[in-house]
Image (tube, rainbow, N blue to C red):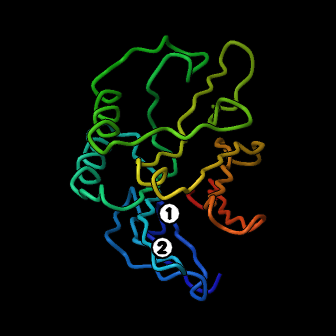
Amino acid sequence: MERLLKVKADRGIMLLWRKEKVKVSLVFKDEQSVNAVVELSNSKYCLISAIYASTDIKRRGYLWKRLSELELSNIPWLIAGDMNCIVKASEKRGGRPFQLKKSNWDFIEFMNKAGLQDASYVGPRFTWSNKRQGDKRIMARLDRVLYNIKWVEWNFNIRVEHMQMMDSDHRSMLVSCDNKKRARGARKSFVFEHFLLE
């Protein structure tokens, strides 16, 4: 990786790319996200957002509001990272029972307003664990990949794999994107590594 764009070191969000493969233009960055327009070699554009949402409800709500203001419905948009939010009971095991609260609704409203779909995945359901054992263990799907309808219209396939948990309390996600019109076997992948965020 020859080019590096990095948000504040205390949050550690990074977006890495090879300058010979794509051209990247920063849209905005803050302590919770890096957002960039990527020009692909075929002169098509997409927006990539790397997220490390705050555990603070108000700050996280500000992130969803700011992302909603992008209004980039005319180009493919991929959002990946730690949303620090779940949207349904099946995305959590252990701890207090799931309740749909304002913080969950803010995230759901953001997804609906932006026309985002939750990418399906392979691998373990839960992406985060408090690393405790027995009845004190809590697991949740805090990390996800979202995309808008333009990804489908432009024939971009997305495959998300939840990797094995290593030293972090989050799983890494391997996100593969390919274009159906591309030559067979020409797949592009990137890895969303949680240890890069911490």
Task: Identify whether 4 is placed above or below 167.
Answer: below
Residue 122 figure quarter: top right
Task: Identify whether 76 is placed above or below 63.
Answer: below
Q: Amino acid at mark 2?
A: Lys
Front residue of this view, candidates 181 and 32: 181
Residue at image x 39%, y 46%?
A: 54
x, y percentage for residue 127? 63, 37
Mark carried by residue 130:
none
Task: Identify whether 63 is placed above or below 22.
Answer: above
x, y percentage for residue 192? 62, 56
Task: Identify whether 68 is placed above or below 142.
Answer: below
Q: Which residue does the numbered mark 2 point to in the structure image?
A: 6
Residue 150 figure quarter: bottom left
x, y percentage for residue 32? 39, 56
Residue at disc 2, secondary structure:
strand
x, y percentage for residue 63? 30, 49
- Can residue 51 be seen by looking at this rendering? no
Q: Which residue does the numbered mark 1 point to in the structure image?
A: 13
Question: Are there few (<14), some (14-19), or many (20+) residues within 10 Å of tag 1?
Answer: many
Residue at disc 1, secondary structure:
loop
